[in-house]
Image (cartoon, rainbow, N blue to C red):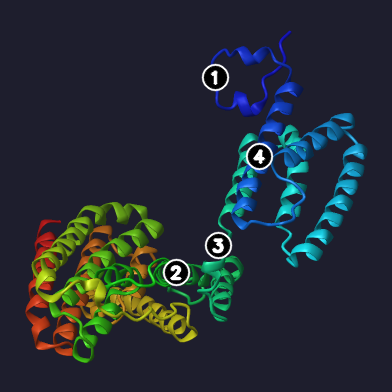
Amino acid sequence: MPTTLHPLFNHYSRSVNPLDNLPQDFLNFLLTTLFALLIGLEQRRHHEQEKLRYLFGTDRTFALIGILGFVLYHFDKEHLLFFGAGGLVLCLLLAIAYAGKILKEEQFGMTSVLIALITYCLAPLIYTQPPWLVLLILITVLILTEIKEGLIAFSEKFDKNEFITLAKFIAIAGVILPLTPREQVIPGLDLTPYRFWLAVVAVSAISYASYLLKKFVFPEAGLFLTGVLGGLYSSTATTFSLAGKTKTADYPPALTAAAILIATAMMFLRILALAFLFNAALGRKLLLPFLVLSLISAAASAYLYFQNSSKEGREDRQPTESQPNPLEFRTALLFALLFVFFAALTHYVLKFYGSSGVSVLSFIVGVTDIDPFLLNLFQGKQAIPEHLAVMATIQATISNNFLKAVYGAFMGRKAIRQFLWLGFGAVIAASFVILLLI
């Protein structure tokens, strides 16, 4: 009776295979040797680049370590006595080799030692763990060995506050959120602490992702890319920042307007993502309108960029400042206060003035951060019909875009005004057309 094919082969083959008749131990031995040899070959290439005078082994040594682990594991798979004893002996030999490396090279890195121990454990991993986990471990070992220089360069970009910021985000998303009560606090107002904090986490996650991209992936981003990343964080804040710099720095007005408009295009996509996250049905209603508005904003931005880039110089030569940290306590506190305020305001406006009151309110909120108001709509805290919620969302973006156009025109140089009125005028006009059609 043929032996069952090893999962690493059976996982990728559903048809009859000649390997089906091979013993499973034979296949496991081949896999152990192959994976250990791959790790050893990578070690040889890595050490040849570093030109070390002393090392305990590369391809053959690592292959033999993998085979040793296979043999000792195969002797006693249940109690692992031979495998454990072999591991202790290997640790002793590696300790001697590590001491010799310190004496001869005066280097204290333990990467090769740790990789050798992982290689020794390949056999029990192949026997006992699912194929994806074995392959994931192998790939991770190879990648981590190769990206040493990249990790060093990446770590140099961190300052003392980066890990504090990361700890803050982990705390608000992984610690505070699960512990937040889900019971209604204020009678008659469907505002639970959990839904409130979930909104804070969602907005913070998008803002934090934009912050990391700007600082670590695109640190030298020009105006246009700054607009893209700034739109993920806050298109309103990006508009205020870029428009104001046209008076104090050499920022080309047309290209600055293009960056502001592309930030607005990203704003529509950010709001759409939040809508799908909290209310998929409402997100589907907003999908086509917001994609159209995002494309119109992007088209206006592209038009200004390509029409004026040759006249005013390349935008990536313009200086930019790094985006402020989105997890500052004052920013989170302000968002929290606005969220609660708009939750209560929307509730009482709907109670006393009905749908028409909410419609008027959606235009008014554009003078502030519209995210707290919209997240209240998306989470369904108020008894608002879906059609009204769609209209209120679009209306809030209309007033917010008008605000950005006014602020940008008066905070920036006179030369930027015509570009902002042209771009935002097209977006606002399209928004009103969509309102008439839905």
Q: Which mark is residue 216?
A: 2
Tag 3 residue: 149
Seen from the viewer's position, the closer of residues 70 and 112 is 112
Contact flag, marks 2 and 3 (Cβ < 8 Å): no
Q: Mark 1 to mark 3: distance in Å?
A: 41 Å
Q: Residue 116 at x, y = what percent?
A: 75, 47
Determine if residue 407 is in view: yes
Q: Residue 138 at x, y = what percent?
A: 63, 43
Q: Mark 1 to mark 2: distance in Å?
A: 44 Å
Q: Residue at x 15, y 56 (%)?
A: 438
Mark nearer the viewer, 1 or 3: 3
Q: Which mark is residue 134?
A: 4
**Which image quadrant: the N terminus?**
top right
Q: Earlier in the sequence, mark 1 or mark 2?
A: 1
Q: Residues within 10 Å of mark 2 (few under 14, many from 20)?
A: few
In the rendered view, would you say 359 is above or below 121?
A: below
Q: Secondary structure at mark 4?
A: helix
Q: Which mark is residue 6?
A: none
Q: Residues within 10 Å of mark 1 (few under 14, many from 20)?
A: few
Left or right of 167? Residue 318 is left
Q: Mark 1 to mark 4: distance in Å?
A: 20 Å
Q: Specify the amino acid type for callout 2.
A: Phe
Q: Mark 3 to mark 4: distance in Å?
A: 26 Å
Q: Secondary structure at mark 2?
A: helix
Q: Residues within 10 Å of mark 3 (few under 14, many from 20)?
A: few
Q: Earlier in the sequence, mark 4 or mark 2?
A: 4
Tag 1 residue: 14
Determine if residue 392 is in view: no
